Image (cartoon, rainbow, N blue to C red):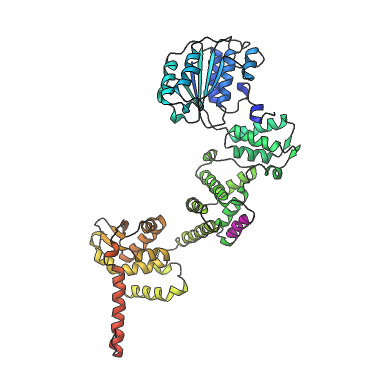
Amino acid sequence: MALTLYRKYRPQTFKEVIGQNHIKTTIQSELETGKIAHAYLFSGPRGLGKTTMARLLAKAVNCLKRKEGESEPCNSCESCQEVINSRSLDVIEIDAASHTGVDNVRENIINNSRFTPTSRKFKVFIIDEVHMLSISAFNALLKTLEEPPAHAIFILATTEIHKVPQTIISRCQHFEFRKVANQDIIQRLSQIVSREEKKIDQSVLENVAYYGQGCIRDAESLLGQILSLNDQKITAEQAELVLPRSRFDLALELVGYLIKSDSAQAIFLVNRLVEEGINLEKFTAELIEILRKIMLIKVSDQLGQFTGTFNQDLEKKVIDFSKTIALDFLLKVVEILVVRRQELKFADIPQLPLELAILEIIGDQAKLSSQEKPDKIDQAPKPPPAQSNQIETEVKKTRLNPIKKPASKSQLNLEQVTERWHEVLVSIKQYNQSLASTLKICQPSVVKADGTLEISLQHQFHQQRINDSKNRQILEKVLAEVFGVPLLVKTIVVKNLSARDNMVASKEKNEVNESLDNVLKTFGGQVID
């Protein structure tokens, strides 16, 4: 049976291990000086070489040809060959996930460690996924780690270091394995392709490294699947049969449309993706990822190292975008997409949440542009035609009746706010019709001396809508314009609000009654029940 690539090309010397230089340097120095620790703890994400490093250390300490001052195993002596072929009686590998109980620890580790090695200098115990041991098993192992036999070396490996008791960690030399840089993975993959006597496009290797996410084993597994296509020359199109299909190029295209405020082309692109069968949830995740990279690069070039690495063409486009996009706009786009991405899971129309996100983003961008003008109500964006006459009438009323601005915050009281609350709602309609509708079923309840206006409402989702940073900014801006003093908004949920008199509704009702009375007086009519 053919071996998988990561087993076939498992490093047999410390030199062959890519990355983890901080670990290799220390362990090789201990081997060269003969100062070997009795217990090691290797932690870090899966597939980074923890078991490989453990086997290299086990092989090196018992190598028959390794000379003083050297660290690399010879790989040719009888002892090295036993470890390579997994038949060494003095290197015991234990999967803690299958041996979690205290009885297994006593039998396989504690009792076994008391006996001297069969034929080598050291007896090495490699315990993989050590965090799976039970508490009683850890306690049993602790005594052995405190007073180990001189001939025993323990190497513990775990992907979840937080589950290992501190008493165990403190008795080991702890090494944290780190994800491998993409360039190192690409170089490693190129060497494997060459040894397999195959040819493969560089862009394919870059994509494999990207999907490996710093995990060398995952990258080698993906490469093995691609090489199984059995073509001497493997192209990017052929590799798509194996690699998860990513469309970072289209994600950047969509970013370009958002910058240009071209909603038609952006929505057309989204619908094209649906027709091509591309998963929009995955595409949105890629879009967020690429926007994050642009954002971090814009903050500092050095922050780019904390993001995924794309192929050279995409990297150049990302850098170009980072020079043209405003940081505030990036933040708003990412915030909207993160929220809308959650809706994609349950949408009856798959593309609708992303279409809404596009319109929201481009709408916000237009508002940001308009805010560069002087902040006046009569310069706000025009309302829809159906509402224009009503709003113009209300605005004229405001102009005919100049606002008497209070001298200070403390002079403004709840009665003043309530009397002019209708003006607040009319003004807010020009910015956000939905917000105005929400505020209609709320009511101002307290005006504090520090300039805080407390608004009561009945439902939490209304509170969340008003507390949205964008909506709160609009509301506080309008309040300042209507009352002449800055007011900070605070919302509270009142369950029995419906039982209380709604101030706004009462005001509207009074206005209607007053108008009706005027009509009756003019024409001499009367109300008939």
Highlighted range, magenta: 265-278
Image quadrant in which you'd find residue 50: top right
Q: Nearer the viewer, residue 96 or 400?
A: 96
Residue 22 horizontal side relative to residue 196, left or right:
left
Residue 410 horizontal side relative to residue 310, left or right:
left
Task: Kindly identify the residue that appears in the image at 67 percent across and 37 percent down.
Answer: 225
Task: Kindly identify the residue that appears in the image at 54 percent across and 38 percent down.
Answer: 305
Q: Is residue 323 visible?
A: no
Image quadrant in which you'd find residue 56: top right
Q: Position of residue 88 (x, y in %)?
A: 60, 16
Q: Main secondary structure of the magenta part?
A: helix
Q: Residue furthest bottom?
A: 524
| Residue 271 within the magenta-colored segment of the rendering | yes
Q: Quadrant of the C terminus?
A: bottom left
Q: Nearer the viewer, residue 298 or 24?
A: 24
Image quadrant in which you'd find residue 237: top right
Above or below residue 475? Residue 146 is above
Q: Position of residue 152 (x, y in %)?
A: 50, 13
Q: Quadrant of the N terminus?
A: top right
Q: Position of residue 346 (x, y in %)?
A: 51, 54
Q: Is residue 183 visible?
A: yes
Above or below residue 402? Residue 171 is above
Q: Position of residue 487 (x, y in %)?
A: 31, 59
Task: Kindly identify the residue that appears in the image at 31 percent across and 67 percent down.
Answer: 421
